[in-house]
Amino acid sequence: MTTTDNTKIDTTDFSDPIDAVRPDDLRLEKFLPYRLSVLSNRVSNAIADAYSARFDLTIPAWRVMAILGRFPNLSAADLVEQTAMDKVAISRAVSILIKNDYITRSEDLADRRRQVLNLSDLGRDVYERIVPLAQQYENDLMGSLSADERNQLDSIIEKLMARAQDWANRGLID
Amino acid sequence: MTTTDNTKIDTTDFSDPIDAVRPDDLRLEKFLPYRLSVLSNRVSNAIADAYSARFDLTIPAWRVMAILGRFPNLSAADLVEQTAMDKVAISRAVSILIKNDYITRSEDLADRRRQVLNLSDLGRDVYERIVPLAQQYENDLMGSLSADERNQLDSIIEKLMARAQDWANRGLID
DNA sequence: CGGCAGTGGTTACATTTGAAACCAATTTTA
DNA sequence: TAAAATTGGTTTCAAATGTAACCACTGCCG
């Protein structure tokens, strides 16, 4: 174990006395990593459909635009840092966006390896139409939660994220 | 809008007065679909590494085993229903597992299209060694949350899942 | 200066994934 | 009981994704 104590945590409180599974079985439908994956896929797919239907944008491409909309004059490396996407994904998204005239690329004369990226006028236009759409999805999701739950969700995600990050760094659980 | 009222929900409470972005900018790092995707990828990748390093199993293959460990004698179609994976993924996972002798496939004489799947002895063996590993990951993740948060997480996920499912059915937000 | 390690970014290749076409067995319906 | 429609499952093909190799440039150290 890395950091956790050995306390058994019962994920669910509704233990069905009759239908109980053997203690050593895994209930996939209650297994957090599994549930996260299903949830995330459902959400992402729905939204990806919406973006691509209306603006012919992939999710990675949209993410790049979302960042450039807030922070102009970034390089691809800056985007990597901001988005947690990898080099290649960024590079591909950027090249699509340039082909679509959604962003512009200009050389950085100080460092001729770097390329400074920005939304084009067209790109900003699209950006400004997508943002409300994105917010609508967000609101719709959040609207399904109680006020209490909304408040906790943020901190829950941060904590889980940090823990998963630990795994990636320190090497896994051993 | 489909189901939501127009109430603006503020995802975050720590609104930084100085550094505030324009109200119409999207803060990707606070955007729930994005965060879910990053979180889910981090978690899944870490675990996928662990499984594949020790047992040469992909995540889909492991999921199939997890279900078969609890519910013997399922068909591929049953697995589709249980796992939320699709036909093709199941078919591929099954064929790998058979090649590894982790599961067995026998014809259903009543319906000769169907194939009844089960863990082999070897498969059950592996299953029984993975379950504790999986539980360890789960516990480690959950251990990063407060008791309160753990209690709410389950219901939060259910609600978000249901909402995202709605999107898929009713067609998206319009 | 002149090499040489490190960085920004793209390309090439292998692997994964998903959609649609497909085959075979079964059920329906007329 | 013979189409026609459905269901279980696999195969095929295209698109998405990740890894590693790579090129061009910079910056450092001798």
Image (tube, coloured by chain):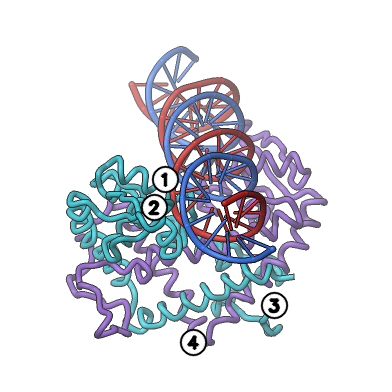
Chain colours: A cyan, B purple, C red, D blue
Mark 3 vs mark 4, CA separation in Å: 23 Å
Q: Is residue B168 visible?
A: no
- Is the residue under label 2 in contact with that under label 1 (CB below 8 Å)? yes
Chain of the residue where label 3 is placed in the rendered structure: A
Horizontal arrangement in the rendering, residue B112 relative to residue B12 (left or right): right
Taking depth in this image into account, of A100 and B158 the one nearest to the observer is A100
Dots 3 and 4 on the same chain:
no
Q: Quadrant of residue C4?
A: bottom right
Taking depth in this image into account, of B120 and A160 the one nearest to the observer is A160
Mark 4 vs mark 2, CA separation in Å: 34 Å
Q: Nearer the viewer, mark 1 or mark 3?
A: 1
- Is the residue under label 4 in contact with that under label 3 (CB below 8 Å)? no
Which quadrant: the N terminus of chain A?
bottom right
Taking depth in this image into account, of C8 and A45 the one nearest to the observer is C8
Mark 1 vs mark 4, CA separation in Å: 42 Å
Dots 4 and 2 on the same chain:
no
Taking depth in this image into account, of A3 and A121 the one nearest to the observer is A121
The label on residue A92 is 1
Residue type of the residue flagged with mark 4: Asp
Indicate the position of residue A169 as horizontal and vertical percent values: 63, 69
Q: Is residue A41 visible?
A: yes
Residue type of the residue flagged with mark 3: Thr
Q: Earlier in the sequence, mark 1 or mark 3?
A: 3
The label on residue A60 is 2
Chain of the residue where label 4 is placed in the rendered structure: B
Horizontal arrangement in the rendering, residue B70 relative to residue A163 (left or right): right
Q: What residue sits right under mark 3 in the picture?
A: A2
Chain of the residue where label 1 is placed in the rendered structure: A
